[in-house]
């Protein structure tokens, strides 16, 4: 069974540009979450999608957005990039239980974004 | 709000036992996860606690006390390959996201 796949693995962008990252969840997983990981702040929750709907959003500016497609694949977009957006962006997929709660999160290898 | 604290760094020697503590203050509690992350790799699941007590899985055990807002991860018979970052994460009130501590970097030496 294939794991969570994130593309691209590495990306270098210039300040002011925008970027789109992609995540393909494990087959059958309908919840996709995105996290930003930096040395100073650790893993911080960006947003979560289930059945093409954003159910939860972390404390990030509106420049960070995402969406989920009908096949559960997800993309996140960062517009007007800033130097501080340089980070590892991790995607995780989960099954969703009866209460609508996510079960164990399986993480992808991440996309390393460098803004110069 | 939610706050999760764990030590930044720990060191230990091969064969020893190490305990990594995690304290949390959250509005509502739906469970606590421990993940392991080797440098340059994705976090991988270690354990999940939702009720008080100890969960044992091979060399790794995790303990939870909900009344104290406290958990620990116990690693026995340490091996060099256990050198990694250990992440404590609490499930948010909606059950839809993980709120992570900043992680504990464990260095195991021979």
Image (cartoon, rainbow, N blue to C red):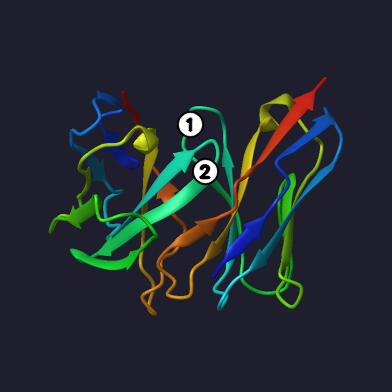
The label on residue A9 is none
Q: What residue sits 53% from the left and 44% below the top?
A: A42
Question: Could you say where residue A83 lies in the image, as x and y percent from the top left?
Answer: 35, 32
Q: Evaluate whether residue B72 shows in this view.
A: yes
Left or right: B31 with respect to A105?
Answer: right
Mark 1 secondary-structure assignment: loop
Q: Which residue is mark 1?
A: B41
Query: Which residue is more in the foreground, A37 or A28?
Result: A37
Question: Could you say where residue B100 lies in the image, as x and y percent from the top left?
Answer: 54, 54
Mark 2 secondary-structure assignment: strand
Mark 2 neighbour class, 10 Å CA radius: few under 14, some 14 to 19, many 20 or more:
some
Question: Could you say where residue B11 lies in the image, as x and y percent from the top left?
Answer: 80, 32
In the picture, the quarter occupied by the N terminus of chain A is top left
Q: Where on the picture, by quarter, is residue B51?
A: bottom right
Q: Where on the picture, by quarter, is residue A19?
A: top left
Q: What residue sits 49% from the left and 47% below the top?
A: A43
Dot 1: chain letter:
B
Mark 1 neighbour class, 10 Å CA radius: few under 14, some 14 to 19, many 20 or more:
few
């Amino acid at each position: 069974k294939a794991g969570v796949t994130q593309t691209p693995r590495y990306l270098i962008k210039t300040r002011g540009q925008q970027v789109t990252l992609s995540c393909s969840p494990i087959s059958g997983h309908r919840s996709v979450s995105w996290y930003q990981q930096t040395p100073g702040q650790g893993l911080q929750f960006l947003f979560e999608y289930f059945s093409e709907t954003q159910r939860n959003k972390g404390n990030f500016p509106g420049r960070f957005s995402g969406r989920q497609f009908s096949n559960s694949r997800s993309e996140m977009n960062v517009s007007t990039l800033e130097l501080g957006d340089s980070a590892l962006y991790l995607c995780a997929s989960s099954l969703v239980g009866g209460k609508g709660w996510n079960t164990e999160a399986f993480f992808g290898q991440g996309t390393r974004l460098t803004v110069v | 709000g939610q706050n999760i604290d764990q030590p930044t760094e720990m060191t230990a020697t091969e064969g020893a036992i190490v305990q990594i503590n995690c304290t949390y203050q959250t509005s509502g509690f739906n469970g606590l996860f421990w993940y392991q992350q080797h440098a340059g790799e994705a976090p991988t699941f270690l354990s999940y606690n939702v009720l008080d007590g100890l969960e044992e899985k091979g060399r790794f055990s995790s303990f939870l006390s909900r009344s104290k807002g406290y958990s620990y991860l116990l690693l026995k018979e340490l091996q060099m390959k256990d050198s990694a970052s250990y992440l404590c994460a609490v499930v948010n009130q909606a059950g839809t996201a993980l709120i992570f501590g900043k992680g504990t970097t464990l260095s195991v030496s021979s």
